[in-house]
Amino acid sequence: MEAPTAPPTTPQRYEHKYADDAVDVLLIGLGSIGTVYAYLLEKSGKVRVTAVARSNYPLYAGEGVTIESQRFGTITNFKPYRVFKSQAEALADGTKYALCVVATKCLPDITPNAKLLEDSIKSGQVGAFVLIQVGEVVAPECGVKLTRHQNGLRVEEDLYAAAPSIPIVSCIGWIAINTNTAGDVVTWKGVEKTGTGLFPVATADKPHSAQQQAALDLWVNLLQAGNGNVVLTDNIDSMRFGKNVWTATWAGMQGLIRTPAACFEPLSEAHHAQIKKYMREIQTLGWKTGLLYEGMVLQPMGLKAESIDQLIEFDFSRFVTEAGRTTAVAHKWSLLLDVENNRPFEVEVIFGSMVRLARQHGIETPLIDFVYTLLSGLQSSIVRSRNPPAEDSKPVKDFP
């Protein structure tokens, strides 16, 4: 990653500057994470970003936002090249977009990507999709959200099924970021890290095409040209599972107990052993399916995996013991934030995906199944409270 450098000491008003050969990129979702990636792409001078914004459209269509970055200083009046309220509007003039970057949460049980991106898929105007959909961990000790993009496994599947001829670049990232209540100030601390690979993963029988490789190269080159930090992987499924180990463990438990994991520290070793059983089941699934393996480097901390026991002890100490000693409110996952705000969360891609993976390989996962069932009920309650069902409606969701 790029070494930290001293940013400008005075605020800089953002000015659009584009190279003669700049490409057009469509960005769906202009929240805090969408803003950061729009900025990195625009900063390269090689990209004209056309963004689709919803509730904050007036803000970005007007004076733009202020980005307070430890890396780049304070940038005022930032907004992409163009901003629209819908994909249909962004596509109406026939612009060909080299990439469509998706910076929204992945909720296949609510709005599948294929439905979300229907206009872009049908238009024939998009060269490739880049998925950086988001979830975050709130870390009050540093005053920001540590954003983790595209939570869960196999988040690309329904989009790939709907548009198999369009390359998909899948991203996993970490960035410390927050947006104020008004939405006009984005605070960005430290150096972001974006894990990137192609979906589906190449095999000996089906290597990646030249079109897929070109899409990956373009995304990486554009992001790096804007000083973005990229970690390439040839197995995005494996990198995703490595991240999902933590998401499924701590986000799941927080969603059920409604408090961060530091609450477990005062309990006995017998209590801790029960939590570690759940952690072991998740990690065993990864090792048995080959998605976790000895010597694998787990991002973002760069930890080299040696064994299940090593990963369990490292993880438990980091989130329970150490978190409890520093602050009892540290590491609040986005799933808990969603539950607290009565918003749908990523139950299918984080938990349902593991249940389906286990079924495919004939592996018993009773604890994962149980957590998935409880969280599915919670998700159902949230959805029904937001959209009351008809009196004659019946449950249609089947267990994987």
Image: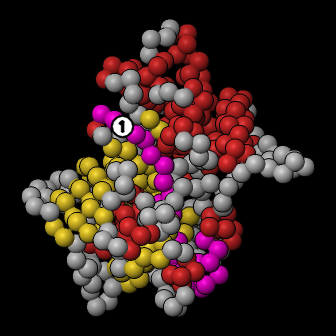
In this picture, residue 202 sits left or right of residue 16: right
**What x and y, as percent, mark residue 16?**
26, 79
Q: Quadrant of the C terminus?
A: top right
Vertical placement of residue 183 versus 344, above or below: below
Q: Quadrant of the N terminus?
A: bottom left
**Image point 38% across, 84% down: which residue?**
23
Read off the residue under disc 1. 139
Vertical placement of residue 254 versus 133, above or below: above
**Image point 19% across, 60% down: which residue?**
74
Q: Report the coloring of the rendering.
A: secondary structure
**What x and y, as percent, mark residue 365?**
70, 32
Where, by quadrant of the figure, is residue 20 drawn? bottom left
Determine whether the residue tagged by mark 1 lies in a helix, strand or loop: strand
Vertical placement of residue 87 versus 368, above or below: below
Q: Is residue 40 found inside the magenta-colored segment of the image?
A: no
**Which sits in the foreground, 300 or 370?**
370
**Image point 54% across, 55% down: which residue?**
105
**Image point 60% across, 71% down: which residue?**
117
